Image (cartoon, rainbow, N blue to C red):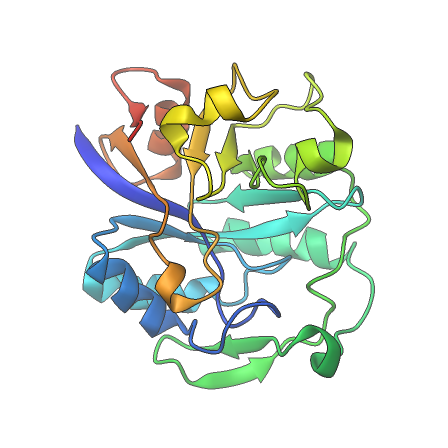
Amino acid sequence: MKIFRVDTHIHTCLSPCGDWGMGPRDIIERSRENGLDIIAICDHNTAENAGAVMRAGVAAGITVFPGMEICSKEEVHVVALFDTLETAQKMEAIVYAHLPGENQPAVWGEQIVADEANCVVGENQRLLIGATSLDLYAIVEQIHSLDGLAIASHVDRPAFSIIGNLGFIPPDLPFDALEVSCRVPLSTALDTVPGIRGYPLVTASDAHFIEDIGRAWFDARMAAPTIAELRQALRGTDGRGIVLH
């Protein structure tokens, strides 16, 4: 077993609320500086920059999980994590089919597609900041059908969180974990965030700016940096686990 330092929620310059400085190469450099072993790229409703960050991560020895932060029709954010870019792209196709609207850069911000060298290769015209027409149950079901992990985003925040928007977590909604924001130490979250007891907990930076990468992270005791191992760590099985700090 090895202890991996993990940040499972990082945006790139593709997210309209993300900074231009969040290019794939810069994200990896900052992650390495902060001692991260595993990161996940979770842009709003898209995975188009995940592949570039994955390629940039190879030389630096950093594992990059491709993912996205999906906005449900209830306007609740859900982090979806996958092992391969192909499965993330399958989820992306489902999201795109249920994502109405077109972006207005002057209003919402530019949505830059970049390569692993930080070069601009295009711009996404979809309204990535918007909500999909998928409900929470459909999103979690689709993530699990692709062997991904479904994590409720920043449950302690009043906006775009399941507790903030619904007031509770439906007991039959099978999240793999709940994400607590950097505002609340993971070690004290059970005492300060109502309604989360009984769920596996993680924390992540939700970085939109380069200096935010690694401002929150968790340690995972696993045999390898894979989604299957992280799933076991969240469940606390076979010697795997999440280490609170």
Task: Name the quadrant of the N terminus.
Answer: top left
Question: Taking the image as drawn, is residue 90 in sight?
Answer: yes
Number of disc labels: 0
Q: Quadrant of residue 236?
A: top left
Front-most of residues 117 and 23: 23
In the image, residue 2 above or below residue 118: above
Q: Is residue 220 above or below residue 106?
A: above
Rendered location of residue 151, percent (x, y)? 54, 36
114 left or right of 223 in image: right
Residue, x 46% and y 42% (percent of image)?
A: 183
Q: Is residue 69 left or right of residue 129?
A: left
Residue 219 percent across, percent down from the top left: 28, 35
Q: Position of residue 11 (x, y in %)?
A: 49, 61
Name the residue located 56 percent from the left edge and 41 percent from the top edge.
154
Residue 147 seen anywhere in this rendered image of the structure: no
**Rendering coords of residue 208 (x, y %):** 49, 63
The quadrant of the image that shows the C terminus is top left
Name the foreground residue: 86 vs 185: 185
In-front residue for pair 24/158: 158
Residue at screen point 36% across, 58% down: 213
In the image, taking residue 197 as reference, residue 72 lies left or right, namely right
